[in-house]
Image (tube, helix red, strand yellow):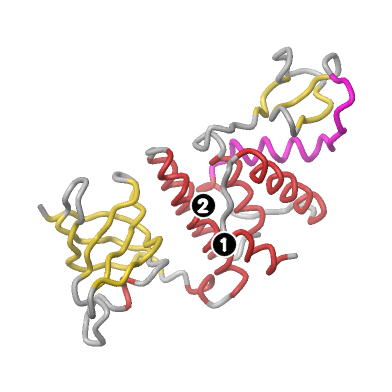
Amino acid sequence: MISKVEGFIVSETPYGDSSKIIHVLTKEHGVIGIMAKGSKSLKSKNRATTLKFTYGIFNIYYKENKLSTLIDVEVIDELANIKNDITLISYLNYLTELTTQVAKQSIDEDIYDIFINAVLLINKNLNPMVITNIVEIKYLKYLGVFLNLDNCYKCGSNKDIVTISFNYGGLICKECYHDEEIVDLKMIKILRNYLYIDLAKISKIDLDETIVKKINLFIDLYYEQYTGLYLQSKKFLKTIID
């Protein structure tokens, strides 16, 4: 059966002398494998459109739970701004690897929407660190280590919040506070905004760079301690932005 599937190539694997298997993140099916016959050939119409980071409509012979076969690709966006900037490419590479791991653990259409909207915003030159942090916060629930940013993790109150506990993954109110490190309430507010904001509705970002970096460090440490993900793309990204 011929199907039109919107998707994003997250990786490619050589197959024989002239073909390859592309792994495509899709909204409906998660990550699927597609055989791109002859796509490595210089004369192939699919040579340029089967490279990693291609975002388009994939016309395929779809086979559920099996390797599908590619007919052709209609590119939606070339993502030219990203592909001409080593820093932005590094962010994209990390988000792609992270999303692939998240998609393995949870089949949810929202994962695709979060990822694609983030990529398009980065391509529009919006702050890539902020966009990446928003994605990371939203992905925590799919990784099973949700960060409670609504109420006190001890008593459930949403009043008089004084800090957030890194160890317990939640807010702490004045009554339950013991000796936890005090975190800037502005940072907590922004973290909560990251969790609930609709990426598709973001048109500009106006945040203090100091707060942005503090939030990025907090999220980095949280991921390192609780997700079990140790991605090479993240290590490389740190060398670029540090």
Q: Residue at x 59, y 46 (%)?
A: 136
**Disc marking residue 51:** none
Q: Nearer the viewer, residue 137 or 40?
A: 40
Asked if residue 102 lies left or right of residue 206, the reply is left
Q: Residue at x 42, y 45 (%)?
A: 103
| Residue 37 pos. (x, y %) | 19, 72
5 in relation to 148, above or below: below
Amino acid at dot 1: Ser
Asked if residue 114 lies left or right of residue 135, the reply is left
Quadrant occupied by the C terminus: bottom right
213 in relation to 40, above or below: above
Q: Residue at x 36, y 72 (%)?
A: 51
Q: Nearer the viewer, residue 120 or 51?
A: 51
Q: Are marks 1 and 2 in contact (CB under 8 Å)?
A: yes
| Residue 30 pos. (x, y %) | 34, 46
| Residue 109 pos. (x, y %) | 38, 41
Q: Disc 2 on helix, strand or loop? A: helix
Q: Nearer the viewer, residue 107 or 125?
A: 107
Span highlighted in magenta in the image? 177-198
CA gap, disc 1 and disc 2: 9 Å
156 in relation to 167, above or below: above
| Residue 72 pos. (x, y %) | 21, 68
Q: How many marks?
A: 2
Q: Disc 1 on helix, strand or loop? A: helix
Q: Residue at x 56, y 40 (%)?
A: 138
Q: How dense is the environment of label 2, judged by Cα within 10 Å: few (below 14), some, or many (20 and up)?
A: many
**Disc marking residue 98:** 2
Amino acid at dot 2: Leu
Asked if residue 134 lies left or right of residue 170, the reply is left
Q: Which residue is mark 1?
A: 233
Q: Is residue 186 magenta?
A: yes
Q: How dense is the environment of label 1, judged by Cα within 10 Å: few (below 14), some, or many (20 and up)?
A: some
